Amino acid sequence: MLHSAIDALERQEFLRGLNQDYQRLRDDPERWQEYLAERQEWDPLA
């Protein structure tokens, strides 16, 4: 049970950090546009 709680907490912290990273990226319009352009390049390959 403790192992499951630790796993859940680690996932929650990872997702919180990921969300913060994306927010910082969105807060910078130039970098956000670069990200979107790169994502568009990679989408056909997925």
Image: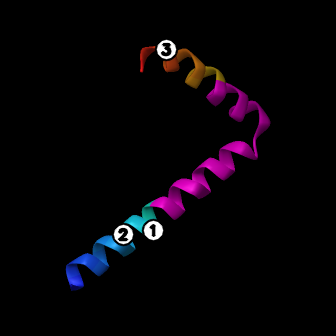
Task: Measure the C-alpha gap from mark 3 to mark 1.
Answer: 31 Å
Q: Amino acid at mark 3?
A: Pro
Q: Residue at x 36, y 69 (%)?
A: 10
Q: Which residue is mark 3?
A: 44
**Left of 32 or right of it: where is 16?**
left
Q: Earlier in the sequence, mark 3 or mark 2?
A: 2
Mark 1, residue position: 13
Which contiguous range is marked in magenta?
15-36
Dominant secondary structure of the magenta stretch?
helix
User: Where in the figure is residue 11, as x and y percent of width and height?
Assistant: 38, 65
Against 12, is 25 above or below?
above
The reply to whether discs 1 and 2 touch (Cβ–Cβ < 8 Å) is yes
Residue furthest bottom as drawn: 2
> In percent of the image, x 21 and y 78: which residue is there?
3
**Does 15 appear above or below 27?**
below
Q: Which residue is mark 2?
A: 10
Q: Nearer the viewer, residue 3 or 33?
A: 3
